[in-house]
Image (tube, grey):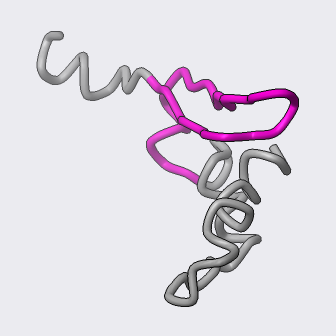
Amino acid sequence: MRRFVFFPRELYRSDPCWAPPLWLDERGAYTAERNAILAHSDSLLLLAEDGGRVVGRSLAYVDHAFNAYYEA
């Protein structure tokens, strides 16, 4: 989780226009306890690595309530 949350800090560290998020809020955005969508979804955090260095991240989820509502 730590590597997932702090990846943008590494990616944008040399960009003078980047403003970091509130890190505690950022961590909560990816947990079911603090994110209403993830609370009723199956989710997976994915890291893309190159030689052990994180080069990308993604959150994949299935929103079961959405699928039930739209009969998907």
Residue at the spot 66% in from the left edge and 29% down from the top edge: 48
In this rendered view, identify the residue nearer to me: 15 or 38.
15
Magenta-drawn segment: 35-61
Q: Quadrant of the C terminus?
A: top left
Residue at the spot 49% in from the left edge and 27% down from the top edge: 60
Height in image: 31 above or below 65?
Answer: below
Residue at the spot 75% in from the left edge and 29% down from the top edge: 50
The extreme left residue here reads: 70
Residue 12 screen position, x and y as percent? 61, 69
Q: Is residue 55 left or right of residue 62?
A: right
Residue 57 screen position, x and y as percent? 60, 39
Residue 31 screen position, x and y as percent? 67, 45
Residue 18 screen position, x and y as percent? 54, 82
Q: Quadrant of the N terminus?
A: top right
Q: Quadrant of residue 16?
A: bottom right
Q: Quadrant of residue 14?
A: bottom right
Residue 39 shown in magenta: yes
Height in image: 57 above or below 20?
Answer: above
Residue 21 shown in magenta: no
Q: Is residue 52 left or right of residue 8?
A: right
Q: Is residue 4 left or right of residue 60?
A: right
